[in-house]
Amino acid sequence: MKNNGNHFRKLCEAIPQQLWVADPTGALTYVNKRVTEYFSVSAEEIIGTGWQTLIHPGDLPAVIQKWTHAIQTGEPYKVDFRLKGADGVYRWHIGQALAEFDSNGQVTEWFGSNTDITDRKVSEQALLTTSQLLDQSQQIAKVGGWELNIITGDLFWTDETYRLHDTSPEKFNPTVDAGVSYFLPDSREIISQALDAAINECKGYDLELKTFTTQGRKIDIRTTCTVTQEGGKAVKLVGIFQDITDQKNTQRKLENINRELKQSNIDLEHIAHYDALTKLPNRSLLADRMQQAMIRSQRHGKAMAVAFLDLDGFKEINDTYGHTVGDNLLIHIASKMKEALRQEDSLARIGGDEFVAVLTDLVSPADGEPLIKRLLEAASERMIFDDKTVQVSASIGVTIYPQDGVDADQLLRHADHAMYLAKQAGKNCIHLFDVAQDIAVKAEREELGDIQRALDNNEFILFYQPKVNMRTGQVIGVEALIRWQHTERGLLPPAAFLSVIEDHPLSTKVGEWVLSTALNQMECWRLAGLDMPISVNISAFQLQQPDFTQRLEILLSQFPNTKPHNLELEILETSALEDIAEVSIVIDVCKELGIDFALDDFGTGYSSLAYLKQLPAGLLKIDQSFVRDMLEDPDDLAIIQGIIGLAAAFDRKVISEGVETIAHGEKLLLLGCTLAQGYGIARPMPAKAIPKWVKTWRPNKAWSNK
Ligand code: C2E
Ligand code: MG
Ligand code: MG
């Protein structure tokens, strides 16, 4: 037993807990080594006292209350409290004690222990903090959690899940069926299926649904589920339960705003693209439709007609009956015209009483004709407003794409132009735009522009072709012949460009350039010691300008050293005949200035005695077409003989042009024509080649004998 007592004592000293024994009043009678170590006191110092001074003041009331109760009742004592160690630090302990009783049931002794539970307390505290934090954040985020044990059927909700259901663990016992029953019917079906799939097929879910709370409040929720499996079977479902009512409300609000915005965009679009009165597309939408129709037409190789329609007499209706009647008429006509067209056609209102119809997918341009006629009829239908019968008609201009291969804007302009011609043709009719004419007009406009530019850029030059007396060998002058030194096409003869400006003021500009260039050249040669008469071709248009002679005089005055009689003007016989009286006056005036005329290409006009009498030109230039064939063609020879005779009779000089060979010259000399010009003598050449040519040229020997 002694041994046993020793063993127990040793044991008491060895265990890590503080052990103590106290009398029935609670005064300590024994403490083990852990106690003296912890407080760093000797056993004597602590025996006979209690713990009170060493207990944390915050824990003391509870300890006193428990200990008092134990002493009074003898019941076991158990309490958590903090004890201050020798180092001044409080550590958590669990104090426990059991009483020893005598045969009378009185407490004889207390046996107790203090076990350090600081580590447990710390982790308990940490856990508490974490779960509080979790609960708080769940509350803030309105996210609750749930867990379902599939084996036991136990459903666990976090506090927030209860709160989201407007309830608490005390008031509500969560079960799967109860939870599901609160969902709105549509959502209930979805969640039931989702839960089935989770349990039976281990499929998780993430859903946005609607549910009622236990208080009947409707909320939007997001609920998710992840499945834990064991051996391929679902054993546990864990998920969140989140109140997303606020987000959903915001989303719904945004959706509403979006819807409203979309609607007002549609309204705005309508205003931007439709005519408010007739509800027909306006000009801007028409442009779009035309673009699309043009693309389709190209793709399918079909034609498209653009009909520009302007009402005849609409202004009068407005003036007579007022704008209300006018507006009603427009609305009415618009709908009648729309009825007259096919589904695929477009009708737009682009101005007060102007409409445009675009007829697409026409196999041939003629296919549009009946439709346009129906438009014309629709526009001229008689209508009755307020007992007033009103009627107008329409003028329609039409152009067909791609025959008229221009852009949408120009198509409209062409149709508009054709409409204008329909008006001019008496209204209430259809006029088709003339594409060929338009192309020709455009080409001409372009060419005129080119010629004006050539003039501005100094691209014209004069070549000079000598005129000689075949018998004496005298060079009697040169003819100035225009050329165009074209930047891309090279040196162009007059036939390539003069016809374009024939009846255009530009021909006068070019003509004046030729005159002044020739006069200038004459002056240059004069200064170089060469006295060389120049003949200049004058177009009929220039000649017929009322101020022709005045302008010629001004020009001459710019070259005071030039002898006017060295300038000769060549006019075509044919053009001189256009206004014979006027031309003969011009010739007379010029003669007074000292300038003589030649009738060019003589023989191609009437060459009548009566005309010749009226035209006092000093020189007749036999047209080269007669000269060319005179050696083979007796008729041409006869004409030449006739002209030579005519010249002699009227005392005019005569010159042959187009003398290409010696033989031609010989024959002409025999006929009595000594003056000549032609490739057989010299080709037209640049001005700088003339002086040398003049110096070196000798007539053919065959000629001088004739
Ligand atoms: P034209 O006034 O009858 O001029 C003679 C034309 O015949 C020139 O042609 C000349 O190169 C060409 N020619 C001369 N000899 C021969 C020949 O032996 N055989 C052939 N086959 N042709 C010959 P070009 O220079 O082409 O001028 C053609 C026409 O253009 C001129 O005929 C004239 O009517 C007109 N022209 C030329 N320059 C001017 C000008 O400055 N102003 C105006 N208004 N017309 C001009
Ligand atoms: Mg000529
Ligand atoms: Mg000629």
Image (tube, rainbow, N blue to C red):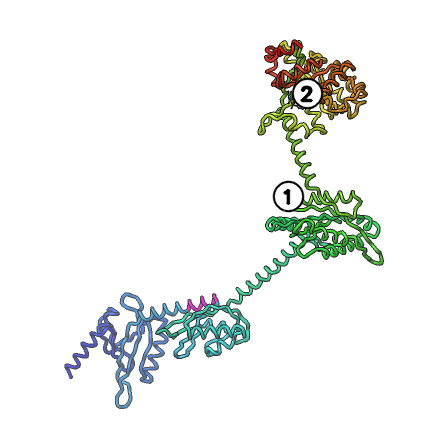
Ligand 1 within 8 Å of disc 1? The answer is no
Q: Is residue 413 above or below residue 19?
A: above
Q: Nearer the viewer, residue 635 or 246?
A: 635
Q: Which residue sits furthest left? A: 3
Q: Position of residue 577 (x, y in %)?
A: 77, 24
Q: Is residue 304 above or below residue 221?
A: above
Taking the spot 37% from the left edge, 69% from the top edge, the residue there is 127
Q: Position of residue 14 (x, y in %)?
A: 20, 74
Label 2 Cα crowd, 10 Å radius (few <14 / some 14-19 / many 20+): some
Sequence order check, earlier mark of 2 and 1: 1
Taking the spot 34% from the left edge, 77% from the top edge, the residue there is 64
Is any part of residue 513 visible from this angle?
Answer: no
On residue 405, the disc is 1
Taking the spot 31% from the left edge, 68% from the top edge, the residue there is 90
Magenta stretch, residue numbers? 132-141
Q: Which residue is mark 2?
A: 630
The three-letter amino acid code for the residue at tag 2 is Met
Real-space CA distance between mark 2 and mark 1, rounded to the nearest whole angstrom: 51 Å
Left or right: residue 53 compared with residue 483: left
Q: Position of residue 386 (x, y in %)?
A: 83, 58
